[in-house]
Amino acid sequence: MAGELDLYTAPALREALRRAVERSPKRLVVDLAEVTFVDSTVLGALVEARSQLARGDAFALAAPGLEVRRALEVSGLDRHFSVHDRIETAIE
């Protein structure tokens, strides 16, 4: 994912996450390194994907930039997601 994720890009993101969750991964890591903005629609899609996994700790967010991290903090979702500064630590 890259750039601004909002109401217009959320359906594609939701579909990609749905397909990933259907494969029943041991861990699903969403790389946010190149994402510059997320709105509440996208945050909702992330919550939805996390809730569809059998284990909540199987879902992780990696490398959010300043704006994305701020959106996670303001929404309180940073306390509910496993958020990692680097993709490598999110995968471990």
Image (spheres, rainbow, N blue to C red):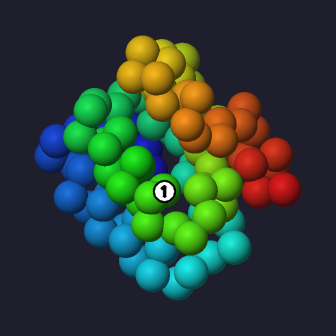
* Image: 57 above or below 23: above
Q: In this view, does 36 lie to the left or right of 57?
A: left
Q: Which residue is drawn at 48% across and 31% down?
A: 77
The one nearer the camera, 87 or 24, is: 24
* Residue reaching furthest to the bottom: 23
* Residue reaching furthest to the left: 8
* Figure label count: 1
Query: Dividing the picture into quarters, in which one does residue 85 lie?
Result: top right
Estimate how packed mark 1 is, as few (under 14), some (14 to 19) or many (20 or more) residues with alpha carbons within 10 Å.
many
Name the spot of residue 62 as percent of width and height, x first: 64, 42
User: Under tag 1, what secondary structure?
Assistant: helix
Q: Inspect this view and state whether residue 22 appears.
A: yes
Q: Is residue 67 left or right of residue 59?
A: left
Q: Which residue is drawn at 55% across and 37% down?
A: 80
Q: Which residue is drawn at 59% across and 56% down?
A: 56
* Image: 81 above or below 10: above
Name the spot of residue 6 as percent of width and height, x first: 23, 38
The one nearer the camera, 12 or 53, is: 53
The one nearer the camera, 72 or 66, is: 72
Q: Which amino acid type is shown beneath numbered disc 1?
A: Arg
Name the spot of residue 65 as percent of width and height, x first: 56, 25
Q: Which residue is drawn at 56% across and 70% down?
A: 54
* Image: 36 above or below 52: above
- Image quadrant holding the C terminus, namely bottom right
Name the spot of residue 48 as percent of width and height, x first: 36, 55
Q: Inspect this view and state whether residue 71 appears.
A: no
Give the residue number, with chain letter if any, for mark 1.
50
Q: In this view, does 84 lie to the left or right of 1?
A: right
